[in-house]
Image (spheres, rainbow, N blue to C red):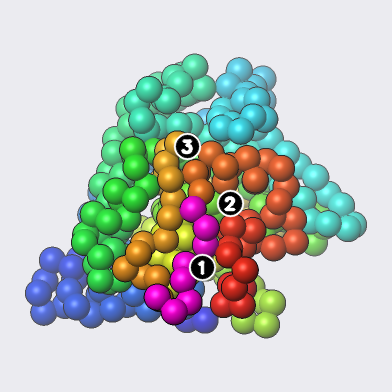
Amino acid sequence: MATLKPIDLSGLNDERLASSVRAQIAEACEKNGFFQIINHGVPVELMDKLKEVGRKFFDLPKDEKLVYAGKPVLAAEGYGSRMVLTDSEPQFWREFLELHTLPLSERHYNYWPQKPAEFNETVEKYTAALMDLAHRLLSVISENLGLKPTYIKEAMGETQQSIVFQCYPPCPEPGKTLGLPAHSDIGGITILMQEGDGLQVAAANDTWELVPNHPNAFVVNLADQIEIITNGRYKSANHRAIVNSDSTRRSYVTFYYPAKDQKIIPAPELVDAKIGPLYRELYYLEYLQALAAGRAKDKRLVQSFAINNPLIT
C-alpha cells in the first residue's frame, strides 16, 4: 500500500492540475479505499475549534459527561465509555460522544453538551463544512467512474450525517486491547480528523499500516454502501485504532450515510453484462439490522450481501 501521502485538493480548481488530482483519488479508491487530503477548503480555525470543544468535553468530570449517556440501540447516540482489557479477543479502549446532525429532524439536542458553551455552534458550523466537502468528494468519485457528478449522492437518498468525538486515554497494557477493533464503516463516506497517531488501515499479507497524522489533513475512507453502489469497483477498507500507554489520542469522525428506507443497488453502468451485479439490492435499514445481529463476525459485513460470486473477497 502507498504511504497515504496527502492529496492536495486545491488542484481541482486548477485546470492544469485537476486531472492529476482526480487520478490520484481514483487510484486511492481502487487500491486502498483510504486517502488523505489537504487544502480541502475547511478553515483550519474551524478544525482547531472543534478539537478544542472536544478536548474540553472529555476533560469534564465523569458524572457531567454521563448526563449525555446514550442507549445501545440501532441508531445509538450520546456519550459512552468502554475500557476492556483481555488476553484473548481485542476489545475497546475509548470514550466517545456520537451526535446525529442531519437531517435536522434527527438532531437531538438533549445529547449535545452544554459545556463548553460554544460546543453547539462549533459542531453546527463544522458539520456543515464537512457536508459540503463530502458532496465535493462524492462528485469527483462519481465522475471518476464515468457517472454523472450527483450519482452517488442521489443513490444514497436524503442526506444523513453524524459526528463521533473519540478519546483514547493511555492504556496500562496496550497489547491487550484496541481503541477500536478492525472494521469497515457501514455507510457511504467517512471523513476523519485525528490528533495523534493510532489509526491503522489493513495492508497486504494481513498486516496493518499506520495512517500518518498530517497537520490540517483529513483522512477519507470509503464505506460499505459505496462498495455496493460501485459494484465492487471501489472497496471499503478495514481499519482499526490502536492505543498506547503514554498519551491520549483523539479523533473526530464525520459519517455520511443513506437513509434507512433508501434502496441501495449497484450502478447499472458499472455492472458487467456477462457477470451481472456482484451485490444484491437492499434497504439500508436491512444493513443496520444485519450489523446488530452480528453477521460480520468472520468477514466484512458487505460480503454477506454479495451474490454468490468468486470476485468478492
Residue 120 position in % (x across, y down): 38, 26
Residue 105 vs 246, above or below: the answer is above
| Foreground: disc 1 or disc 3 | 1
The residue that disc 3 covers is 260
Q: Which residues are magenta?
A: 273-281
Identify the mark at residue 249; answer none if there is no mark.
2
Identify the mark at residue 111; answer none if there is no mark.
none
Q: Residue at x 80, y 45 (%)?
A: 84
Q: Nearer the viewer, residue 252 or 278?
A: 278
Q: Nearer the viewer, residue 272 or 67?
A: 272
Whether the magenta-drawn stretch holds residue 108 is answered as: no
Residue 129 position in % (x across, y down): 27, 44
Q: Nearer the viewer, residue 170 or 108?
A: 108
Whether the magenta-drawn stretch holds residue 276 is answered as: yes
Type of the residue with mark 1 = Leu
CA distance for labels 1 and 3: 22 Å
The kind of secondary structure element at disc 2 is strand
User: Where, by quadrant of the figure, is residue 12 drawn?
Assistant: bottom left
Residue 122 falls left or right of residue 261: left
Q: Residue at x 62, y 62 (%)?
A: 303
Sooner in the amino-acid sequence: mark 1 or mark 2: 2
The kind of secondary structure element at disc 1 is loop
Residue 113 position in % (x across, y down): 49, 23
Q: Nearer the viewer, residue 121 or 70?
A: 70
The residue that disc 1 covers is 278
Residue 116 visible to the viewer: yes
User: Where, by quadrant of the figure, is residue 181 drawn?
Assistant: bottom right
Residue 253 visible to the viewer: no
Q: Classify mark 3: residues with Cα within 10 Å, few (<14), some (14-19) or many (20+).
A: some
